[in-house]
Amino acid sequence: MPTGHTSHNKAQVAGLLLAGGGGRRLGGRPKALLPHRGRPLVEHAVRALREGGCEPVHIVLGAAAEAVRAKAELPGCTLIDNPDWAEGMGSSLRAGLASLADTRAGAGAALVMLVDQPGIGAAAVARVAAAYDGPSCLASAVYGERRGHPVLFGAERWAEVAASAVGDRGARAYLKEHQSEVTLVDCSDIARPDDIDTPEDLKRLE
């Protein structure tokens, strides 16, 4: 009979998808709507979060938010409009954590993903979510020597993470400051953390 995971399981981990990017280097094409396997990229990210065990799922929209609402099928997700999306990822992270805190969903942690990393799927989500061991937890996927997404923040840390999230750095400064407390979860065998940032990167989308 398995032990050790009865009180802290994946059901306590909410998914937080940052999907506000305007795709400036892609000619202004919003990243959430880039086509991948016949559907918008945002739908693939949501599926990865859900199949990886995250619930509820909150999505922060920014560029072309109305178009994303109209074109993407995102049933059961909480959609948050971030009017300050152009300030960078930090503003979207703040908006998303505030939404999770406001909903009183009872989640013990938020698992954060970026919409423009299609090589990160449910397996990596599940592996990082499994590192959850309480509301002060900090965990991050690593790829070789490089830390990346998904990143998990226990609920007790949300306010501090939000306060540190400025510009396009997201939670990087917070994670660096608390690096001795971060559980590193190797995902290099099951995921690729490549971003879709430039026209050249579009080759990674099918």
Image (cartoon, rainbow, N blue to C red):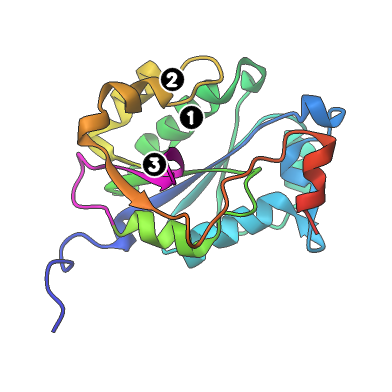
Residue at 21% across, 32% down = 180
Say if mark 1 contacts mark 2, CB within 8 Å. Answer: yes
Task: Residue 66 in the image: state x and y as whole percent.
Answer: 76, 37
Q: What is the crowding at mark 2: few (fewer than 14 residues within 10 Å), some, or many (at least 20)?
A: many
Q: What element does badge 3 sit on? A: helix
Q: Is residue 12 left or right of residue 37?
A: left
Say if mark 3 contacts mark 2, CB within 8 Å. Answer: no
Q: Is residue 71 visible?
A: no
Question: If you read the primary sequence from the N terminus, does the residue marked by circle 3 or circle 2 appear first?
Answer: 3
Q: What element does badge 1 sit on? A: helix
Q: Quick check: 133 above or below 10? A: above
Q: What is the crowding at mark 3: few (fewer than 14 residues within 10 Å), some, or many (at least 20)?
A: few
Measured in 3D between alpha carbons, the distance from the residue under mark 3 to the one under mark 2, in whole angstroms, is: 21 Å
Q: Amino acid at mark 2?
A: Ala
**Image mark for residue 103:** 3
Task: Residue 120 in the image: state x and y as whole percent.
Answer: 56, 54
Camera-side residue: 36 or 181? 181
Camera-side residue: 188 or 41? 188
| Residue picked out by circle 2 | 165
Q: Please give the range of residues in magenta.
A: 131-150
Residue at 16% across, 78% down = 2
Q: Amino acid at mark 3?
A: Thr
Q: Is residue 148 left or right of residue 74?
A: left
Residue at 30% across, 60% down = 130
Task: Residue 181 in the image: state x and y as whole percent.
Answer: 20, 35
Q: Quick check: 94 above or below 71? A: above
Q: Amino acid at mark 1?
A: Leu
